Amino acid sequence: RLELVLVPVTDVDRAKVFYTEKLGFSLDVDTQPTDELRVVQLTPPGSACSITIGKGITDAEPGSYRGTHLVVTDIAAARAELVARGVDVSDVRHFDRAAGEWRPGSDPERATYNSFADFADPDGNTWVLQEVPESS
């Protein structure tokens, strides 16, 4: 099972504020055993998988983390909440299978895995909201 994903950031404190205050992630761990190592573990609400930001945890470039999906039951409500918290979230879009193209707004049928919106953290690491309605 997947339990932890490393997200590279330039400013640990700035990222910690973004993930806790703007996205509502829970702070699980914030420890700095040495000057070269700081580990900040955060968990999205309702998730069994956490992320870690920090210093000395990865050699990946800040902003290189791309497209991890956060599954929500109501994409319009999730987007509105994030926007109210100050997150710059794209408009919701869905893929119209019949037309073979992207269309604005949520999937009119609320099909599972078919409505999306995007945002980035302060370093440019990107995330995708994806809707899976509760009735699915």
Image (cartoon, helix red, strand yellow):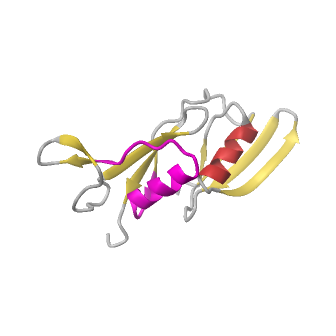
Relative to 65, is 39 above or below? Answer: below
Relative to 107, is 36 above or below? Answer: above
In the image, is 59 to the left or to the right of 34?
Answer: left
Magenta-drawn stretch contains 73: yes
Q: Residue furthest bottom?
A: 135
Q: Residue furthest left?
A: 98
Q: Residue furthest front?
A: 84
Q: State the image coordinates of residue 111 (x, y, percent, origin top left).
A: 26, 60
In the image, is 81 to the left or to the right of 106?
Answer: right
Q: State the image coordinates of residue 94 (x, y, percent, origin top left).
A: 27, 48
- Which quarter of the figure is the C terminus placed in? bottom left
Span of residues in magenta: 70-93
In the image, is 81 to the left or to the right of 36?
Answer: left
Magenta-drawn stretch contains 9: no
In the image, is 55 to the left or to the right of 136?
Answer: right
Asked if residue 68 shows in the view, the reply is yes
**Depth check, front residue: 35 or 20:** 20
Q: How many marks?
A: 0
**Depth check, front residue: 103 or 11:** 103
Q: State the image coordinates of residue 34 (x, y, percent, origin top left).
A: 88, 38
- The image quarter in which residue 32 lies: top right
**Depth check, front residue: 94 or 51:** 94
**Depth check, front residue: 95 or 31:** 95
Which residue appears at 54% of the width and 45% of the height? Answer: 87
Which residue appears at 57% of the width and 56% of the height? Answer: 49
Q: State the image coordinates of residue 12 (x, y, percent, origin top left).
A: 73, 38
